[in-house]
Image (spheres, rainbow, N blue to C red):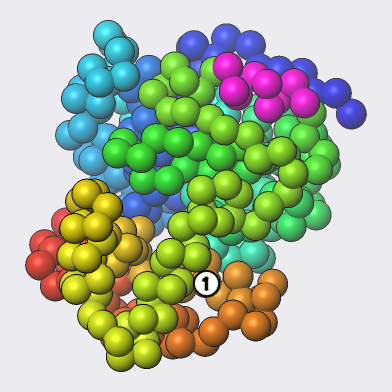
Amino acid sequence: MPFTLPLDVRTRPVAVIGAGTLGRRIALMFATSGHVRIYDPARKAGEEAVAYVAQHVSEVAARVGSDVPGEATATTDLEEAVAGAWLVVEAVPERLELKRQIFGDLDRVAAADTILTSNSSSYPTSRFIDAVARPERVLNMHFYMPPQQVAVDLMSSGHTDRAVLDFLLRELPRYGVHPFEARRESTGFIFNRIWAAIKRESLAVVADGVSTPQEIDRMWEINTGLKGGPFRAMDKVGLDVVLDIENHYAEENPALPAGPRELLHRYVDAGHLGVKSGRGFYDDYRARV
């Protein structure tokens, strides 16, 4: 069924559903050129996300060439968050039933011309549109770690109107991000499929007792010339998120080794989630306030 593309996108807000590590970073990118509403049922999380955007938006807007940066506001009311929005980006935890519920709610309360997207890093939108009456406006729009990593995967739900994909390919660069289309359904999209193999093997090397996170990251820096490494990167994403993603990959491919997931479980069960908890594979982070 054809979809009527949204009009007046320059004056309409973007809604981000979820104020976590990625939600606030996604909000930051859209705030460089407009108003963003952040929905989270936890009021404090929403307030922290707004503060994060306010702290960084002028710098990032200047970097992407936006003369007049916008702002972010937060709400605990989903309907208020999406009212009048031309685009909604879901950024809740990687749990299939939660995403099914959210997209059913979004389809019910969002305007008829609102594009509904998921930042899911492992689930294609085809898996959670059961309760969506208008799937032609739904697709994956997966961010990495903006504002440093600004590539974005776009992937059809299998029902997405072609005009929606073309529209986002044209529109998203205005916000300082670079969209790439996954031309067929792919768990992990494009870059994440490559990154998953690196991440999983790094975890396996530690789980097998061959090396440590710190030594692997240092070798990564020496051999690639890049700063950081797989374990620093996982700490930034959040080890609970990394574990959710690995569990999903294992559901699709039971032959994957269990060692990497068992290692992650030990950290997550101890509450060591990475940067957001102040400790993960490294313990030199200040807890987020």
Q: Is residue 223 left or right of residue 238?
A: left
Residue 32 among magenta residues: no
Above or below, 34 against 123 in this view is: above
Q: Residue 193 in the image: x percent, y percent?
A: 55, 56
Q: Quadrant of the N terminus?
A: top right
- Front-most of 139 and 214? 214
Magenta stretch contains residue 168:
yes
Question: Is residue 174 shown left or right of residue 171?
Answer: left
Magenta highlight: main SS = helix
As rendered, which of 177 and 218 lies closer to the eye?
Answer: 218
Q: Quadrant of the C terminus?
A: bottom left
Q: Which residue is mark 1?
A: 246
Q: Could you tell me which secondary element the residue under label 1 belongs to?
A: helix
Residue at the image position 25 percent from the left and 26 percent from the top: 60
Q: How many marks?
A: 1
Taking depth in this image into account, of 176 and 101 the one nearest to the observer is 176
Q: Residue at x 22, y 65 (%)?
A: 219
Q: Is residue 120 left or right of residue 127?
A: left
Q: Residue furthest bottom?
A: 209
Answer above or below: position of 247 versus 173.
Answer: below
Q: Quadrant of residue 145?
A: top left
Furthest residue toward front: 223
Q: Residue at x 46, y 81 (%)?
A: 261
User: Which amino acid type is shown beneath numbered disc 1?
Assistant: Glu
Q: Is residue 135 visible?
A: yes
> Does residue 154 appear to the left or right of 211 in the view shown?
right
Query: Of all residues shown, which one is farthest toward the right?
Result: 1
**Residue 58, quarter of picture:** top left
Q: Where are the magenta residues, as a range? A: 162-170
110 vs 191, nearest the viewer: 191
Question: Which residue lies at the image location 23% right of the left edge and 17% below the top edge?
Answer: 62
